[in-house]
Amino acid sequence: MKTENSKGQIFTSVVVLALFAAAFILATLITPSTLHAQQGGGGGGSGNENSNCPSYTTNVAPSCPSITNGMSLSPMSFCVKLGDDLPDPSWTPPGPGATPGSVVTTITETCSNTVTSSTNNVSYSFGWHYDAPGKPPKPTTAGTVTSPICWGTVTSSDTNDCSPDSSQTPINLGVVTWYVIDPHPNTVAVGYDASVFENAIDGFFSHCPGNFIKDITITVGTEGSKETGQECCPTTGAPDNYAKYSGSVSAKCSVDVVVPGWSWDGGYGGTTPFLYLIDWNATLGPTITLTPGGTIALSGKTTDPDCGSCFTGSLNGSCGLALKLGATASATVQLFESGHWYSVNDTFTVDISGEASTSASAGGQYSTGTDCGTSGLSGATFSIGGVDLTGTAQLTVDGTGFSFTHTFHAWDGWSYP
């Protein structure tokens, strides 16, 4: 019995030792990785296990955009016709701008010392708006309309790391002013007394010798107007009051000038076989016909306040000339019978004439002022018309006429420019 108990104790001890050996071998295989993890996490500490791994450290490095061109609007005043929409200003060229920016984010895994990074591009955008209650509606009457304050704003694409500060947004850009004008002018006719011009022309020809002037016909026409209203001054953008004046005088005359020629009158009577009487006359001489005419026109514009003025005067004139050389002969025959004279015929007439005609014209205008475009003399013209020769012969017996006319074009004329 004693021997059997000793064998059992020896077997038990062998089993226990085998278990300890297996545990030692297993511990040897596991311990290096565990120690490595403790050293990486603890950074060379005591070697005990670090339960904080993995661990991350984040670093953000912003480089925000920089504003290079400030915000401003133009124009800040407008001249608008009543009924038109109110225009908005726009950015003053070249407009607001900013350099590009970026945000670099770095993440470090502290246990393994692994570093990763990312870059986010950042930009600024610009805008503006009217303060409440907003842009005024389209006006219904003429006058001045003013907007609320215009605010300029800057918006960032990254509001967390590169948000603009209060000195950059919002910015007071001022107020907009609209000058609303009534585009409908007031026009009135201005009359001139035409008889003043007619009397002046008639007085001029009255100084000519009376035996030279055969006939004068004078026609004078006048017209004029005055227009007042408002317009937008192109240089200041503000409204101004203007007045436009225009007027013209046109005159046309026809003057027949008789150059002294020759004239014969006579008669002849006989008794065989009965009493008869022949009365005759003949004339030969030139006649000059002048047809002068012209138009004087004046126009002008003034503004208040001064936004330019212009005054223009123009003159266009013409004169026709006809030189006629004519010969006329006429005769009547009467018979005396039973104590009375009887007409055998009415008037026997022969007319022969030759005529040369031409014309001349000239014109131009003169302008002066700050709003004329072109000042000084302009549009000067001069021309001489062609020359036509006309021959006419006419025979009239007892009220019945026979005539012949032929015209020959002798010259085409000349003009400048």
Image (cartoon, rainbow, N blue to C red):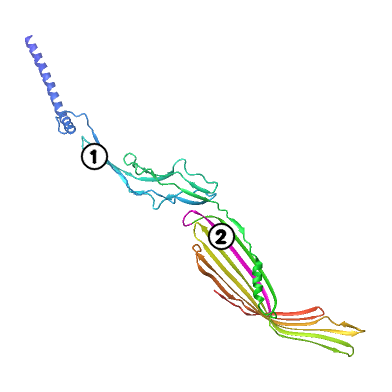
Picture coordinates of residue 224 (x, y %)? 61, 62
* Residue assigned mark 1: 115
- Up-down relation of residue 45 to residue 297 (above or below): above
Picture coordinates of residue 389 (x, y %)? 66, 80
Q: Secondary structure at mark 1?
A: strand
Quadrant housing the N terminus? top left
Identified at 88% across, 83% down, the residue is 341
Alpha carbon distance from label 2 to label 1: 82 Å
At label 2, the amino acid type is Lys
At label 1, the amino acid type is Val
Quadrant housing the C terminus? bottom right
Examine the rendering and report whether any part of residue 87 can be seen. no
Nearest to N terminus: mark 2 or mark 1: 1
Picture coordinates of residue 316 (x, y %)? 59, 70
* Residue assigned mark 2: 244
- Give the extent of the magenta segment: 234-257
Main secondary structure along the magenta-highlighted residues: strand
